[in-house]
Image: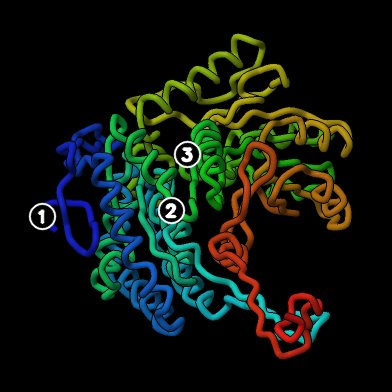
Amino acid sequence: MSEYKMYINGEWVSGGNGAFEVYNPSTRDVWRNIPDASADDAKKAVDAANAAKEEWAATNHVQRSRYLLKAADIVERRTKEIAGLLTEEAGSWIGKAMFEVGYVIDLLRAAAATAYQVKGEILPSDHGKLMMVERVPLGVVSVISPWNFPLLLSGRGLSVPLAVGNTVVLKPSEETPVTGGIIYAEIFEEAGLPAGVFNVVTCSRDSVQDVGDVLVTSPEVGGISFTGSTAVGRQIARDGAYHLKKIAMELGGKDALIILDDADMEHAVDAATFGTFMNQGQICMSTERIFVHEAIADEFVDKFVARVKGLGIGNVNELGCPIGPIINDKQLDKIHTQVTDAIDSGATLLTGGSYDGLFYQPTVLTNVTRDMRIFREENFGPVAPIMTISSDEEAIELANDSEYGLSSGVITTNEERGMNIVRRLETGIAHVNDQSVYDEPHVPFGGVKNSGIGRHGGAASVEAFTETRWLTIERGGRHYPPPFLAKNH
């Protein structure tokens, strides 16, 4: 479309607060002007979803599944175009962008399958009743998504709720309103989704509080899917809980990779490089702390630094340049402040530590200690803090010394040893012989501690975005006490 608009009740509309500018992080040039929604726009979207929810919930599960399958086909047909939008709007490396689009195709098809997985049960009755438990949609679900994997994470939030009979209002990040939101409106409109079933509101950072309040606190909203920072997640959890909403949220991470003394060295270097620097570290489950056994630490560090120095940076459309830009100056300043603090506190900088525009050089730090900000705070950048360990126990203790608990990985040639460790790690996700960055559409994805509540994916999303109801049919076996019976009056 020549001009981007929001999508409410099956119509393309402008924003009540005008428009705001979205920038290409690679060039810092204005990329698009996007509708800036008001609270009233958000209310209209919620009202539209609320008006459509009864008919959508009653729509046959086969038909709901077909809409999602058709949407997947549309994404597949538009793969190259959407990947190009991701490189421009989100600063995605083309390899990451192609992966993200491919993942979303599979995600939509997996979600279509969940329409068949809304299962009930029959319970025994003490009094001969027919007792049933069924799962029903929540009604309206608000989806609030981030900028780092905008297409994927919006898709994860909206797909299963739609499949199981909810209507949706999506608010993408102000950094990526097209690839995180408007593109889905185009897709579902082409797929023929009925008006009001899926709505998109876009807004600037200045308007996000007003719009977000409507999406979180409106009585018509039954559930909330949120992916983003822990700070914002706490506010949404507080407000949503007060209004008794059902919430699934995936928040920040400070994920650990443990490399044991029996690790295959080349595999360890490969894993650490990918886990730390994919999407320049802008992934909730990025490897943000590397614990390597002292017996192999020198060899690992030498090979790892050499590998990191060879990572291409600067042109996201080149397959050989996987390091793209940081999304904005605020994130860049946060990354550099943590790196500078670590160096000032005694860490050794082996490579990186500088930036050009929004491109931050891949950075490796050693002699990191647990009192440094780089150990404690989520970095969300291309930075590898390395600490040495002398035992499995020390590795476990250090890895668990975090307020976060999203993902983790252990590299070892002894699978039993690896499983013994990951079972003691305080994370919602853990991998043996892989780094921390991994997901599939049907798995129960989510964290513990400050990394979130609830789970997204497959059967977990079905549970998160439906509610149980208990229904009975009386068949004459339940007798009231005699004083309540008509023949005694």
Q: Nearer the viewer, residue 66 or 336?
A: 66
Q: Amino acid at mark 1?
A: Ser
Q: From the viewer's perspective, is the residue at label 1 or at label 3 nearer?
A: 1
The mark found on residue 221 in the picture is 2
Whether residue 330 is situated above or below residue 243 in the rendered picture: above
Q: What x and y, as percent, mark residue 212? A: 38, 40
Left or right, 482 with reference to 287: right
Q: Are marks 3 and 2 in contact (CB under 8 Å)?
A: no
Q: Residues within 10 Å of mark 1 (few under 14, many from 20)?
A: few
Q: Which residue is mark 3?
A: 280
Q: CA distance from mark 3 to mark 2?
A: 35 Å
Mark sitting earlier along the chain (1/2) = 1
Q: Amino acid at mark 3?
A: Gln
Q: What x and y, as percent, mark residue 133? A: 66, 75
Q: Residues within 10 Å of mark 3 (few under 14, many from 20)?
A: many
Check the picture and name the quadrant holding the N terminus: bottom left
Mark sitting earlier along the chain (3/2) = 2
The mark found on residue 2 in the picture is 1
Q: Is disc 1 placed on a helix, strand or loop?
A: loop
Q: Is disc 3 placed on a helix, strand or loop?
A: helix
Residue drawn at (12%, 52%) of the image: 3
Q: Amino acid at mark 2?
A: Val
Q: What x and y, as percent, mark residue 436? A: 64, 47
Q: What x and y, as percent, mark residue 72? A: 37, 72
Check the picture and name the quadrant holding the C terminus: bottom right
Q: Nearer the viewer, residue 206 or 480?
A: 480
